[in-house]
Image (cartoon, rainbow, N blue to C red):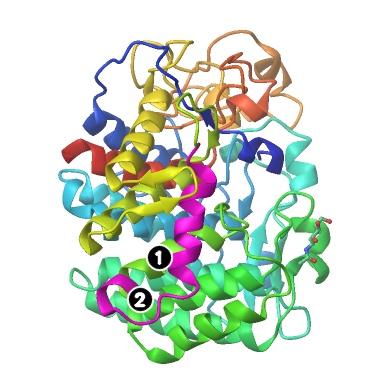
């Protein structure tokens, strides 16, 4: 997995330097979704396109007599961390909700990528007031370099309960189920209803039994990998905001607008990622607030502050953005356009088109308009990362090399300077350092490791720029 620090490091804004190549957003979109097939855990379906992978982890959950077969491996390792997995799912669903109209002919694949996760999240929440939050022992897993198909490390499954709650992970799962219920509403209504009912139950559990999974019995499994650094209050608001969007039940809107004033920490205006949801909450609610002309406080001021805090005032900006922030730029820009508004910052006015241009320059940077002249998406463009920090990608395919490769048997593949034999098409890696340098080194996971939540906001951005 990526360290929290590397998550903060994103792309530099290219300030007029690199030549502007035209990017093939449709190709990148197709690949960004295909990536999820490479991360699949469980029994692979006959329509699997990433064919160097095979079935794996077919007994997950059996230690607790539950079926947790399925879902996604988190990154270059073989652990299923449900907190970032649920956030990934919420972002994929948000991508389809906002930009699904621009996804054709990839819409079906995008929806499949969501369903691979929601099927699993339903399994993880099938027992009332119990939420499974992780499968696999990250210490044992990270100590090995093994293909998922060969795994022989403990597949420990752990859950939060009434006595040992985990409000952040449960609320994020509720958000994922609620957002996905919107995606499935017209195409698969019965499934959509199931997702929404479960989302409400899981949210109620998250809210009624409050606490961080850090401090529960599962803390030693989830920390230091996906600790809840920012507290669980933002996740509860985020879950409620998605439930509001999915149900239009005023209870959830009132929940967000009253509890936002009760948070025990300051609002992090400019932050959005698997841990901190603040900026995402304001932007998500902005659509409803603009549309209904109700009291905008505090969310529109927060959304505006988000824009002002991340948009640089200088003409030659040099600021880090994550893909999730760029996604918010485009969503907020579209809502601003609809409301015929601009954002008034101390250093000047920010128009929706400025926000969209910035997001586009970030996407173009990832795809190749950067000083290294490389794309940071595997198998996209002429140059791309060849030695990504990813167990399955870096070892021979199980289809070619049937013999078991044990825990330490993978070390030579890890240490090799050779290219990865299997292309994890569409995987976007951590990326270059703040001086635009990239090593393409398996041993530098901060730069060379992909993760499910890196790709998810990009799916929406690529869809948008395919047709706009
Ligand atoms: C979770 O653990 C991290 C790391 O120890 C800590 O920084 C954070 O405050 C904890 N979060 C909560 C909600 O206790």
Residue 320, located in which quarter of the rendered image?
Answer: top right
Sequence order check, earlier mark of 2 and 1: 2
**Is residue 414 rendered to the left or right of residue 452?**
right
Q: Are marks 2 and 1 in contact (CB under 8 Å)?
A: yes
Q: What stretch of residues is rendered in magenta?
A: 289-312
Q: Nearer the viewer, residue 278 or 418?
A: 278
Residue 105: give x, y in percent of width and height.
15, 43
Q: Secondary structure at mark 1?
A: helix
Horizontal side, residue 115 vs residue 312: left or right: left
Q: Residues within 10 Å of mark 1 (few under 14, many from 20)?
A: many
49 and 332: which one is in front?
332
Residue 115 position (above or below residue 211)? above
Total labels: the figure holds 2
The image shows residue 151 at horizontal and vertical percentages of 65, 41
- In this view, the mark in front (2 or 1): 1
Relative image position of residue 212 (x, y in whole percent): 74, 71
The crowding category of the residue bearing disc 2, from other C-alpha atoms within 10 Å (few below 14, some 14 to 19, many at least 20), is: many
- Name the element at disc 2: helix
Main secondary structure of the magenta stretch: helix
Q: Is residue 305 magenta?
A: yes
Q: Taking the image as four quarters, which one is ligand 1 found in? A: bottom right
Q: Residue at x 45, y 57 (%)?
A: 304
Which residue has dot 2 on it?
A: 245
Front residue of 436/382: it is 436
Quarter in which the N terminus is drawn: top right
Q: State yes or no: residue 74 in magenta.
A: no
Q: Which residue does the numbered mark 1 point to in the structure image?
A: 284
The dot on residue 213 is: none
Up-down relation of residue 411 to residue 244 (above or below): above
- The residue positioned 82% from the left and 69% from the top of the image is 215
Please, which residue is most extreme toward the top here? 417
Q: CA distance from mark 2 to mark 1?
A: 9 Å
């Amino acid at each position: 997995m990526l360290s929290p620090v590397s998550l903060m490091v994103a792309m530099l804004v290219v300030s007029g330097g690199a030549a502007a190549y035209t990017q093939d957003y449709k190709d990148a979109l197709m690949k960004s979704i295909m990536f999820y097939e490479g991360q699949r855990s469980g029994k692979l379906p006959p329509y699997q396109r990433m064919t160097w992978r095979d079935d794996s982890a077919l007994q997950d959950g059996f230690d607790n007599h539950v079926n947790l077969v399925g879902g996604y491996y988190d990154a270059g390792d073989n652990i299923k961390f449900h907190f970032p997995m649920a956030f990934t799912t919420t972002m994929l669903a948000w991508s389809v909700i906002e930009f699904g109209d621009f996804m054709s002919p990839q819409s079906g694949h995008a929806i499949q990528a969501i369903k691979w996760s929601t099927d699993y999240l339903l399994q993880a929440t099938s027992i009332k007031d119990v939420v499974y939050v992780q499968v696999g022992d990250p210490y044992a897993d990270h100590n090995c370099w093994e293909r998922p198909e060969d795994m022989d490390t403990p597949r420990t499954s752990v859950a939060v309960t009434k006595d040992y709650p985990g409000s952040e992970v449960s609320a994020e799962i509720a958000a994922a189920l609620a957002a996905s219920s919107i995606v499935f509403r017209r195409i698969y209504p019965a499934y959509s209803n199931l997702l929404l009912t479960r989302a409400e139950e899981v949210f109620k559990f998250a809210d009624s039994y409050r606490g961080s999974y850090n401090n529960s019995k599962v803390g030693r499994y989830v920390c230091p990998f996906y600790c809840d650094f920012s507290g669980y209050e933002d996740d509860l608001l985020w879950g409620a905001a998605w439930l509001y969007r999915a149900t239009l039940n005023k209870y959830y809107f009132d929940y967000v607008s009253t509890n936002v004033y009760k948070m025990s920490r300051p609002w992090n205006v400019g932050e959005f990622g698997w841990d901190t949801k603040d900026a995402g909450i304001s932007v998500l609610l902005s659509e409803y607030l603009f549309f209904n002309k109700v009291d905008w406080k505090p969310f529109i001021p927060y959304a505006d502050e988000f824009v002002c805090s991340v948009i640089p005032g200088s003409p030659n900006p040099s600021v880090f953005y994550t893909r999730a922030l760029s996604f918010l730029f485009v969503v907020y820009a579209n809502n601003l356009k609809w409301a015929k508004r601009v954002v008034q910052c101390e250093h000047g006015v920010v128009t929706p088109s400025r926000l969209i241009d910035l997001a586009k320059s970030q996407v173009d940077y990832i795809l190749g308009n950067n000083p290294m002249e490389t794309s940071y998406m595997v198998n996209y463009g002429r140059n791309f990362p060849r030695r990504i920090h990813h167990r399955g990608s870096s070892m021979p395919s199980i289809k070619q090399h049937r013999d078991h490769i044990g825990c330490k048997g993978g070390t030579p593949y890890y240490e090799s300077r050779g290219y990865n034999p299997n292309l994890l098409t569409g995987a976007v890696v951590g990326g270059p350092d703040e001086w635009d340098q990239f090593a393409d080194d398996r041993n530098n996971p901060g730069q060379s490791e992909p993760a499910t939540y890196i790709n998810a906001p990009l799916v929406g951005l690529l869809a948008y720029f395919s047709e706009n």
